[in-house]
Amino acid sequence: MEGEDYKVRLEIFEGPLDLLLYLIKKDEVDIQEISIARITSQYLKYIETFRMLNIDLAAEFIVMAANLMYLKSRTLLPRQEQPPEEMEDEDDPRWELIRQLIEYKKFKDAASLLSRRELEQADRFALKPEKPETDPEPPPLAEVSIFDLIRAFQNVLKRFEESHDLGDIVDDRYTVSDKIEMLLGRFGPGQAARFDSLFEDAVTKAEVIVTFLAVLELMKMNQFVIRQTGVFGEIDIERRASGATTAAEALEAFTEAQA
């Protein structure tokens, strides 16, 4: 892999509450019915994956992790053993977190509604020439969050570990730059493939990780777009048809960004 100083500078526009709402939606449970033990376990797995990938994490992710572990410890204590300052609050230690999630979701839903209305108003009053009939475009990149992508990577890594003997020592043969070059060589402009197919030829865990890091870098460079068939559905990766650069140009841009 790359040197120890390699760090993914990935801009995550979502915070810890977004991750918790994502986990709740994935489990198809009501916010008020969340299991602190389960959601803490899932949340910590995401934090562990971010750290394994050496992704910069905002401090609020770590603060939320500490808060979740504290709440989990409280749920395991009998009421008579709860901290004295907490005895005066509600019996259920989840309520403060639940209130935060409900309020945050209200603001997110309101922002989404205003955004949709803005688009509707723009379409209603704007004068547009008639468009020729074309094939419908696939869902935009915005519909696939970083949490969807990390979940897909976790599934790939789990399957790899289950099917490979990780006790065998194999030299790490690839760097992120190598994988960027290989991916650009594999995908012509407009070509697409299943996300998990990118890892079918990997022989070490390190190669799986490096391949995923290369995908993240190519997304940042606007070379690849990630699409999803539906909510929590299969994920496809596609090289952009327009604005694509050569492998040499992309590698040069990557090297300059790392300098």
Image (spheres, helix red, strand yellow):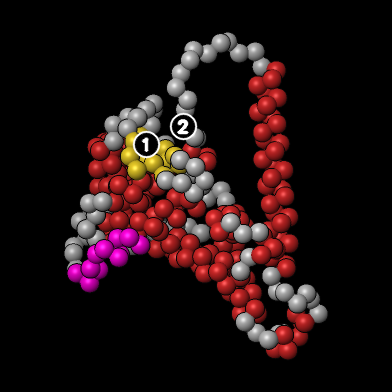
Q: Earlier in the sequence, mark 2 or mark 1?
A: 2
Q: Is residue 157 visible?
A: yes
Q: Is residue 57 above or below residue 65?
A: above
> Is residue 29 or residue 238 the one in the foreground?
29
Task: Identify the residue under disc 2.
Answer: 138
- Residue 149, horizontal then vertical, whole percent: 44, 50
**Which element carries disc 2, helix, strand or loop?**
loop
> Is residue 242 or residue 145 the one in the foreground?
145
**Which element carries disc 1, helix, strand or loop?**
strand
**At 58% from the left edge and 56% from the top edge, which residue is drawn?**
28
Instruction: Tell me, for residue 238, which label it has, or none.
Output: 1
> Is residue 42 or residue 70 the one in the foreground?
42
- Judged left or right of residue 133, residue 153 is left
Amino acid type shown at disc 2: Pro
Q: Is residue 60 magenta?
A: no
Check disc 2: other Cα within 10 Å, few if <14, some if 14-19, many if 20+. few
Q: Are marks 2 and 1 in contact (CB under 8 Å)?
A: yes
Amino acid type shown at disc 1: Glu
- Judged left or right of residue 51, residue 200 is left
Q: CA distance from mark 2 to mark 1?
A: 11 Å
Check disc 1: other Cα within 10 Å, few if <14, some if 14-19, many if 20+. many
**At 29% from the left edge and 36% from the top edge, which residue is drawn?**
187
Q: Is residue 163 magenta?
A: yes
**At 22% from the left edge and 51% from the top edge, which residue is drawn?**
201
Q: Is residue 19 visible?
A: no
Counting every numbered tag in the picture gives: 2
**At 52% from the left edge and 69% from the top edge, which residue is drawn?**
41
* Residue range corresponding to the magenta coloring: 158-168
- Residue 57, horizontal then vertical, whole percent: 51, 59
- Residue 73, horizontal then vertical, whole percent: 61, 80
Q: Is residue 100 above or below residue 168?
A: above
